[in-house]
Image: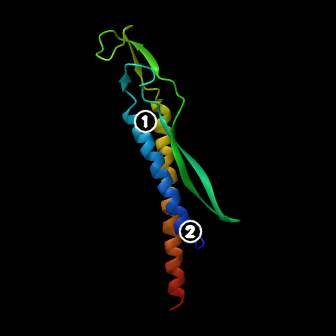
């Protein structure tokens, strides 16, 4: 990094990370009711992996290192009439816990909103400081 991180850089990067988190929640919820013909082909929920970016003591932000599929196992459902059923009459449903995904989505939205508030406060303080110069 060439220059010190400003409050706007820190909050902006945090907001970007929360958008990635929200996108993975949306993907997980969109695939919650999907089924596949094998355990291997079933959808596995996604999770972003974050890491801290520290520039100097007291100044840090976050970045998304990667998005990984979780080890949440798919659910085996016996439904011989389903077009994707295997030779045993089973299909595999995505291992998505919709209640947990909803909680995660609400938490993500709140984290994002907190960073919006930080940016609004910083902007207001900056403008108030500039008015003092007049």
The residue singled out by tag 2 in the image is: 7
Residue 134: image location, x then y, percent: 50, 92
Quarter of the image with the N terminus in it: bottom right
Residue 57: image location, x then y, percent: 71, 65
- For disc 2, the neighbor class at 10 Å (few under 14, some 14 to 19, many from 20) is some
* Nearest to the observer: residue 118 or residue 81: 81
Colour scheme shown: rainbow
Front disc: 2 or 1: 1
Residue 98: image location, x then y, percent: 45, 31
In the displayed structure, 61 sits above or below 92; it is: below
Q: Residue furthest right?
A: 57
Label 1, secondary structure: give it: helix
Residue 119: image location, x then y, percent: 50, 66
* Nearest to the observer: residue 55 or residue 116: 55
* Nearest to the observer: residue 14 or residue 46: 46
Residue at point 52% right, 52% down? 111
Residue at point 53% right, 57% down? 14
Residue at point 37% right, 19% down? 37
Q: Quick one: label 2 or label 1, which is nearer the N terminus?
A: 2
The reply to whether dot 2 and dot 1 touch (C-beta < 8 Å) is: no
Residue at point 53% right, 66% down? 9
In the displayed structure, 115 sits above or below 3; it is: above
The residue singled out by tag 1 in the image is: 28
Give the quarter of the image for residue 132.
bottom right
Q: Which numbered tag is attached to residue 17?
A: none
Gap between marks 2 and 1 measured at Cα: 32 Å
């Amino acid at each position: 990094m060439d220059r010190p991180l400003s409050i706007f850089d820190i909050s902006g990067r945090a907001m970007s990370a929360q958008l990635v988190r929200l996108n993975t929640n949306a993907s997980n919820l969109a695939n919650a009711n999907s089924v596949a013909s094998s355990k291997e082909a079933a959808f596995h929920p996604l999770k972003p992996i974050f890491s801290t970016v520290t520039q100097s003591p007291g100044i840090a932000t976050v970045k998304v290192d990667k998005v990984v599929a979780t080890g949440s196992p798919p659910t085996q459902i016996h439904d011989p009439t389903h077009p994707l059923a295997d030779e045993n009459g089973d299909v595999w449903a995505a291992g998505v816990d919709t209640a947990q995904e909803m909680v995660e989505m609400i938490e993500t939205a709140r984290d994002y909103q907190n960073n919006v508030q930080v940016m609004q406060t910083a902007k207001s303080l900056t403008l108030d400081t500039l008015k003092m110069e007049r």
